[in-house]
Image (cartoon, rainbow, N blue to C red):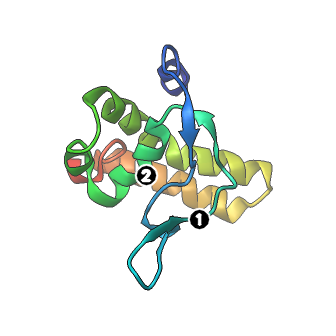
């Protein structure tokens, strides 16, 4: 968590969706995209929105569209995502979700894929 907190030093915050990914993009009949689910939106490091994309597409692909420094921060944020879910589940007293999230973290750690699923 220290590593995550230190990432924010010197980064200019911008509008962040907070749960960005294909699951929150809808297309209308003409193919125009629309973004939904803004309950986690805030002013923060834009790398927070890049982190989930690494899970969907891998760091190499995502690295084609973002700067190297943003990608490096996003990989750290991605590594912490299961711990964030576990912490939220603990606060909400959802032991099943907490256990699932911690198992996910442990599995990723063991596989060497905390920062990038394509790393294995």
Quadrant housing residue 71? top left
Give the label on residue 52, or none. 2
From this view, report whether residue 60 is shown above or below residue 32: above
The quarter in which the N terminus is drawn is: top right
From this view, report whether residue 48 is shown above or below residue 12: below
Q: Is residue 39 visible?
A: yes
Q: Could you say where residue 41 lies in the image, as x and y percent from the top left?
A: 64, 47
Give the left or right position of residue 58, taking residue 29 as reference: left
Q: Could you say where residue 103 lies in the image, as x and y percent from the top left?
A: 50, 56
From this view, report whether residue 8 is shown above or below residue 81: above
Residue annotated with mark 1: 36
Q: Is residue 120 visible?
A: no
Outermost residue to the top:
10
Instruction: Out of 101 and 76, give the one closest to the viewer.
Output: 76
Identify the residue at horizontal 21%, vertical 47% (top origin): 119
Instruction: Out of 63 and 95, give the one closest to the viewer.
Output: 63
Outermost residue to the bottom:
29
Q: Could you say where residue 51 lies in the image, as x and y percent from the top left?
A: 42, 45
Give the label on residue 5, or none. none
Tag in front: 2 or 1: 1
Query: Mark 2 to mark 1: distance in Å?
Result: 15 Å
Outermost residue to the front:
30
Q: Compare marks 2 and 1 and give the one earlier in the sequence.
A: 1
Q: Could you say where residue 70 lies in the image, as x and y percent from the top left?
A: 35, 31
Give the left or right position of residue 113, taking residue 102 as reference: left
């Amino acid at each position: 968590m220290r590593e995550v907190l230190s990432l924010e030093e010197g980064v200019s915050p911008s509008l962040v969706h907070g749960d960005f990914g294909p699951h929150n993009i809808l297309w209308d009949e003409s193919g125009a995209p629309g973004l939904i689910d803004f309950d986690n939106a805030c002013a923060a490091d834009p790398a927070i929105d890049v982190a989930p994309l690494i899970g969907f597409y891998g760091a190499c692909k995502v690295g084609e569209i973002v700067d190297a420094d943003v990608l490096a921060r996003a990989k750290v944020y991605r590594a912490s995502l299961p711990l964030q879910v576990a912490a939220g589940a603990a606060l909400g007293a959802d032991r099943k979700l907490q256990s699932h999230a911690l198992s996910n973290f442990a599995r990723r750690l063991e596989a060497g894929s905390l920062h990038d699923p394509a790393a294995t």
